[in-house]
Image: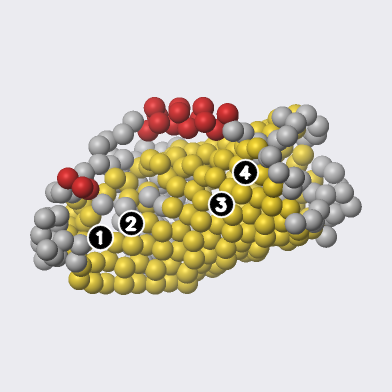
Amino acid sequence: MIRFRKKIRTKRRIKKKSNPMKFLRYLTIFFFLTATIYCQWNFPKNSKFNIDISGFYSSSSTFYDLTSTQIYTITDSSVKKDYNFEKRAYCFDVALKYKPNNDIILGIEIPAAYYSLTEDYLIENNIYSPNYGQTVNRGGFSAVVVQNYKIGGRLLLDSGLFSSFIDLDLKIPMKLKSGLQTEASQPLQIYQAYEVLAGYGASFNLGSGWVMASIKYNYRGGDFKDQMQFHFEGGFTTVPNTFLKAFIDMNQSLASFDSTVAVTPRTTSFQENYYSLGMAFHIDFSEKIYSEISYSLKLWGRNTLNLGLVRFNTGFYL
C-alpha cells in the first residue's frame, strides 16, 4: 500500500498553500501588458504547405493530488520509507499543414514519445544529517509510445485588424481504443483516447504584434473526462524577423472528481485541472524558414503532474 506525503518534514521543503486565482490575475495583467502573437497558421504569399518539426522535453518531480495539494514525496508503507521520483518525456512531432485557399487550412500531426520514470528512497529527510540528500534506487521504468494521431483544420472567418477562426480536430489513439481506469497495465501506464476538439478563437492586430484568445471543447472517449481548454498568447517585437511571446493555458474538467482515480507518477490522469504559463522566442531566417524555442510550467493543478516543458521547433513553407 502506498500513501502520499503532502508535507515534507524539513523546513526547506515546506510549501505554503497559494491562492492560484489571485496569482493568475497578476499573470493575466502581465500577459496583456506584453502581448502579441505569431503562429504557423499565417502562410506567406504563394505558399500552400507548411512542414513543422518539433522536439519536446518535459520533466516532473512533483504532482498535484485530488485536493490540489502539491506532493513532493510518496510513502511506501510496505517498507515504511519515503521516496521521490523523476518522470521525463522526450517527444518528436511532425506536422503538415495545407492551405487550399484563403479561408481553409488542413493539418495532420504524428507524434511519438519516450517516457522514463525513476524512483528513489530517501535515506534521510533531516537537513542537518550527514546523510541528507542521499538516495537508494527503488525502481525504474520506460516506455516508447506513438501518441495520438491528429487530423483537423481551421476555418478563417475574417482578416485584417481583427480576425477570428473555427478549429476542428480529431485525435486517434495508436491502439484504436480508449483507455479505461480499470484496465491492467505495465507499471508505467500511458493511456490514450479518441478525442474531438472544437473551438473558436479571435486575434487583434496591435501594429507591431497582436493578441489572441481561444476556447475549445474537448470530448474524450473511454474513462477520460470531457474538458474545456482556454489559451491566451501574445508578445512583442523590437528586432526585425524576431519576437518574444507569452502564453497562458488553462484546462478545466467538466465532470466531478468523485469517481476519478488519483494520479500517481506511474499512471495517466483521466481527469485534471491546471493553469500553465510559458514564454517563447521566434526567429524567421527567411520568408519561408523559421525556428522557435519555448518553455512552459504548470503553476497550479488538480490530479495532474507538475510539468516543466521545453520545446524546440523548426519549419518551412512550400
Frontmost residue, 259 versus 268: 268
Mark 3 vs 1, N-terminal side: 1
Residue at mark 1? 84
Please report whichever mark, 3 or 4, sits nearer to the chain's N-terminal start. 4
Residue type of the residue flagged with mark 1: Asn
Residue at mark 3 to residue at mark 2: CA–CA distance: 20 Å
CB atoms of marks 4 and 1 within 8 Å? no
Q: Secondary structure at mark 3?
A: strand
Q: Whole-Å distance between the Cαs marked 3 and 4?
A: 10 Å
Which of the two labelled residues, at mark 4 and mark 2, occupies the earlier sequence position?
2
Which marked residue is nearer to the observer: mark 4 or mark 1?
A: 4
Instruction: Specify which label sits upstream in the sequence, 4 or 1.
Output: 1
Q: Secondary structure at mark 2?
A: loop
Label 1: how many residues lie within 10 Å, few (<14), some (14-19) or many (20+)? many
Q: Which residue is mark 4?
A: 244
Disc 1 to disc 2: CB gap under 8 Å: yes
Circle 3 residue? 294
**Distance from Cα at disc 4 to Cα at disc 2:** 28 Å
Closer to the chain start, of discs 1 and 2, is 2
Q: In the depicted view, which residue is nearer to us: 5 or 3?
A: 5
State if disc 2 and disc 3 touch (CB < 8 Å). no
For residue 70, side relative to residue 143 (left or right) = left
Q: Secondary structure at mark 1?
A: strand
